[in-house]
Image (spheres, rainbow, N blue to C red):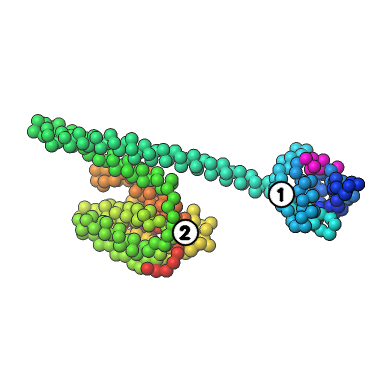
Amino acid sequence: MDSSQSALLLLHPVRDEQEQITDFRIVVANKTVAAFVGQEPDVLLGELHSRWWPDYKSNGIFEHYCRALSQHKPLELEHHYQNDGADRWLTLVADRFGNDLRVTFLDITENKRIQHQLEATIHQIRSSNENLEQFAYIASHDLQEPLRKLQAFGDVLQSQFADSLVDGEVDLVRRIQNSAKRMQVLVRDLLTYSRLSTQTEPFETVSLARLIKEVLGDLEVAINEKHATVRVAALPNVLGNPLRLRQLFQNLIGNAIKFQKPDQKPLIQVTARHPEPTELPEELREQSQRLYVLVEVTDNGIGFDEKYKARIFQPFQRLESRSAYSGTGIGLAICKKVAEIHGGTVDVSSQVGHGSTFKVYLPIYGHNA
């Protein structure tokens, strides 16, 4: 008993002339419970519970003991113990043992501290999500409307007043139109990114093979224009949201087609395999007992210096000029966020002038499609 981390007591009920329980006398006590009052167990034996814990009749513990003794079944109580400078959370379990009461209580203060931290974190996340939802509303309504008007006015200038504009003015209108279009794309991408954290769609079994086939269909025009070759190996099923996963792979394959040398035909390969535990990125190594699929999207494009690989997954980060390659710099941030929502992540290996391999780690589910 003395080696137990739990506090142990055996209590005998003390009754008045009407057979009503007025207190409990300590029959057995171990070192853990005696330490609560700074004594050795022998000092507590034979004493009334109320001598060492005088508040127990007013804080609900006495009534808990009486109920447990009368109901002939174990009863559990969570109690915040504050006395003599001690501030602890305890779980008390009391059950009848013959004519006596057996009491066990465990210090759960550390668990409570962690619980309170988690509750505070959840509250912060909820507040953050509310802010994101407000931003999403502003982005989808208040920002889109003036941009549409700006483009509409530009269209009017080009269509109705083109003959009245000199070359410099025509160029200004064209720049206004292009800026408005870029802003619309930026707002749309930013809205997509913010919604990833606020929208929680149910997961379902997704055939990656079918999903990649649909993505290639959507990218058919870009593939034909660049004379790209896309080779897709056998892919498994995963548990996830098909719309979000489609965003992920459409961004990766679309980037592989886009970031190419002008005189080079894109060659893209999509493969899947089970990674070794040592291959897992640092953020997944604590979950190495889970089974992951590693989907690799490899290209022969322009590549980049790997010292920038953490940067490219951040929103609005670009390594290439906008004039050379279009885009808002948020596509890879969306990929990273989608993978994290699914319990995985995205990593990359690359070399300047020799292409890149984007590595998507997703929890595995089901069989090959």
Q: Position of residue 307 (x, y in %)?
A: 39, 49
Label 2 crowding class (10 Å Cα cut-off): few <14, some 14-19, many 20+? some
> SS of the residue at dot 1?
strand
Residue 52 highlighted magenta (yes or no): yes
Q: Nearer the viewer, residue 150 or 359?
A: 150
Mark 2 and mark 1: Cα distance apart in space: 43 Å
Residue that lies at the very extreme toward the front in this rendered image: 18
Whether residue 64 is visible, yes or no, is: yes
Give left or right: position of 91 versus 275: right
Q: In which quarter of the image is the N terminus?
A: bottom right
Q: Mark 1 points at which residue?
A: 77
Residue 151: say if magenta.
no
Magenta part of the protein: which range?
51-58
Label drawn at residue 280: 2
Number of residues whose C-alpha sits closer than 10 Å to that of mark 1, classed few (under 14), some (14–19) or many (20 or more): some
The overriding secondary structure of the stretch rendered in magenta is helix
Camera-side residue of 224 and 307: 224
In the image, what residue type sits under mark 2? Leu
